[in-house]
């Protein structure tokens, strides 16, 4: 197997994969269209953050880079729900001290990965190098050097395409090899805004929580940043009536919309309308591809293979899990083609499962969390986990805190568990109303023991 590999894209997937390959002693070339984010501030000072969970942490640990990332993390212990009248409810994510997720700066984490690759393995990506086309028959990658303006070609094989949701490599696979791809775009878009730090640099709302303002058809969320600010994201229909991005086109309509739906946050965001008018509306969607590779020439990795909607906070986590899995397969004997084929066969059912769960979570975050039965089911699911730790782990916990449980298992068991919770809460208003004998009988009847330690991956 050739020891030299090209990675297209120095984003989160490409940078972590470069480290994994370098650890195997392979020569890695990384090509990236954008400038070096360690030198150029590409988001005009905005601080965009993501939720990092157990799967991502496990993969960062596997590459020996977690310690570098740790100082960037802010633990979030649960969701703080903001009702329209300003009242707050806290819903913990888990019930053990380590069952938290972490807010992390996207550019900060990307920087850590790039620095680590450079410091430990001498990998210096070539920035401002854009892939233009690929020719699988001629084994050619056509690049444009955006510094000199000159095009050049290089052989493909093997190419790891970590070039994101709009992957040019995936499009070439469709055009030249007939790979079928469905890009399911949501009718909702998103806009990122800032809730600035207090004068003393402190967080102005609870720091160790993910904040949600669920409003049915739309929602606002906020994740903390290390500098005391929060990144606030509005998820809203793109068009169709007063509650859509299309309608929010002036200071007046924006101020009125926020005053009406999110009154508690308005005094904390003085630059709201200006920022709203300046910042772009992003699109979200799910990418389904029925193949991820082209013989031994190229394989898709991360969002390029399976972009998902962001409502489970798992896109990057799934990408990092890809890197771990591809590394494992490459360490075993086998040619590139068979490694790429096996990678697809193993990962596809899992990424399909998280794609479906992420879509389901959109409804839960913006709507179901407001239902009193939701809180009852949450409380009951923790009780079931306490009573039957080997059989019942809440689905959210399986996804976020148990890297040893594959996504597809979490998805399948989640369906059965949902049935258990529905049956037990049909007539009950509180957990104490439900006879323990009924709980025990139903759980043992419907759920086999899990083949994992209930203490999770920690
Ligand atoms: P990308 O981050 O898109 O990186 C691709 C790289 O390839 C880029 O650097 C790009 O410049 C480069 N590139 C593209 N085309 C070319 C080309 N032709 N030539 C050369 N280079 C090229 N995930 C989580 O786990 N938790 C979260 O909380 C979370 N929140 C999210 C919130 C939002 C609003 C969104 C949109 C996503 C969120 N995600 C989250 C998902 C996460 O952002 C993605 O899964 C992750 O960034 C994918 O990484 P990637 O490296 O595969 O792709």
Image: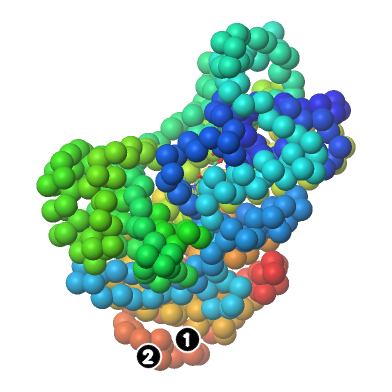
Q: In x, y percent, where is residue 181?
A: 49, 28
Whether disc 2's CB lies below 8 Å from ligand 1 is answered no
Residue 361 in the image, given as x and y percentages of width and height: 41, 57
Element carrying mark 2: helix
Q: Which residue occupies 33% across, 69% down?
A: 81
Chosen colour scheme: rainbow
Name the residue at 41% across, 59% down: 229
Label placed on residue 244 = none
Secondary element at image label 1: helix
Q: Based on the displayed image, in which of its 4 quarters is residue 388 positioned?
A: bottom right
The N terminus lies in which quarter of the figure? Answer: top right
Q: Which residue is found at the position 44% from the left and 39% from the top?
A: 43
Position of 228 with respect to 15 (left or right) is left
Residue 3 in view here: yes
- Seen from the viewer's position, the closer of residues 364 and 445 is 364
Taking depth in this image into account, of 134 and 111 the one nearest to the observer is 111
Query: Are there few (<14), some (14-19), or many (20+) residues within 10 Å of tag 1?
Result: few
The C terminus, quarter of image = bottom right
Residue 400 image-quadrant placement: bottom right
x, y (%) of residue 222?
38, 59
Vertical relation: 205 (above or below) 220: below
Residue for badge 2: 433
């Amino acid at each position: 197997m050739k020891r030299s590999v090209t990675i297209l894209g120095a984003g989160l997937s490409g940078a972590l994969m470069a480290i994994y390959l370098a650890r195997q002693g392979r020569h890695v070339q990384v090509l990236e269209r954008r400038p070096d984010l360690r030198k150029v501030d590409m988001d005009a000072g905005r601080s965009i953050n993501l939720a990092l969970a157990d799967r991502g942490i496990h993969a960062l640990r596997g590459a020996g880079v977690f310690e570098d990332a740790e100082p960037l993390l802010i633990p979030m212990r649960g969701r703080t729900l903001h009702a329209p009248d300003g009242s707050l409810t806290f819903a913990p994510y888990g019930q053990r001290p380590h069952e938290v997720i972490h807010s992390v700066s996207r550019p900060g984490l990307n920087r850590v990965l790039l620095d680590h690759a450079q410091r430990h393995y001498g990998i210096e990506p070539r920035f401002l190098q854009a892939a233009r086309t690929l020719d699988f028959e001629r084994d050619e990658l056509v690049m444009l050097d955006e510094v000199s303006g000159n095009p050049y070609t290089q052989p493909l094989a093997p190419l790891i395409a970590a070039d994101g949701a709009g992957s040019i490599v995936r499009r070439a696979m469709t055009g030249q090899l007939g790979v079928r791809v469905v890009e399911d775009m949501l009718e909702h878009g998103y806009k990122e805004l800032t809730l600035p730090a207090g004068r003393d640099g402190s967080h102005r709302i609870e720091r160790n929580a993910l904040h949600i303002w669920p409003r049915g058809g739309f929602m606002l969320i906020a994740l903390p940043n290390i500098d005391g600010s929060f990144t606030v994201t509005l998820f809203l229909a793109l068009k169709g009536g007063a509650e859509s991005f299309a309608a929010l086109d002036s200071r007046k309509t924006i101020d009125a919309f926020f005053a009406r739906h999110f009154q508690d946050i308005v005094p904390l965001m003085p630059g709201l309308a200006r920022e709203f008018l300046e910042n772009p509306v992003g699109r979200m969607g799910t990418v389904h591809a029925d193949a991820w590779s082209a013989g031994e020439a190229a394989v898709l990795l991360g969002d390029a293979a399976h972009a998902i909607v962001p409502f489970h906070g798992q896109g990057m986590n799934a990408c990092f899990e890809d890197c771990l899995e591809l590394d494992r397969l490459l360490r075993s004997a086998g040619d590139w083609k068979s490694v790429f084929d096996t990678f697809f066969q193993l990962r596809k059912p899992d990424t399909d499962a998280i794609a479906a769960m992420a879509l389901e979570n959109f409804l839960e975050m913006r709507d179901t969390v407001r239902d009193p039965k939701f809180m009852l089911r949450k409380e009951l699911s923790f009780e079931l986990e306490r009573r039957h730790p080997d059989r019942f782990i809440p689905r959210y916990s399986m996804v976020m805190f148990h890297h040893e449980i594959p996504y597809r298992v979490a998805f399948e068991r989640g369906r059965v568990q949902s049935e258990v919770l529905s049956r037990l809460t049909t007539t009950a208003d509180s957990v104490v109303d439900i006879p323990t004998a009924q709980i025990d009988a139903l759980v043992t009847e419907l759920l086999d023991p899990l083949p994992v330690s209930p203490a999770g991956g920690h």
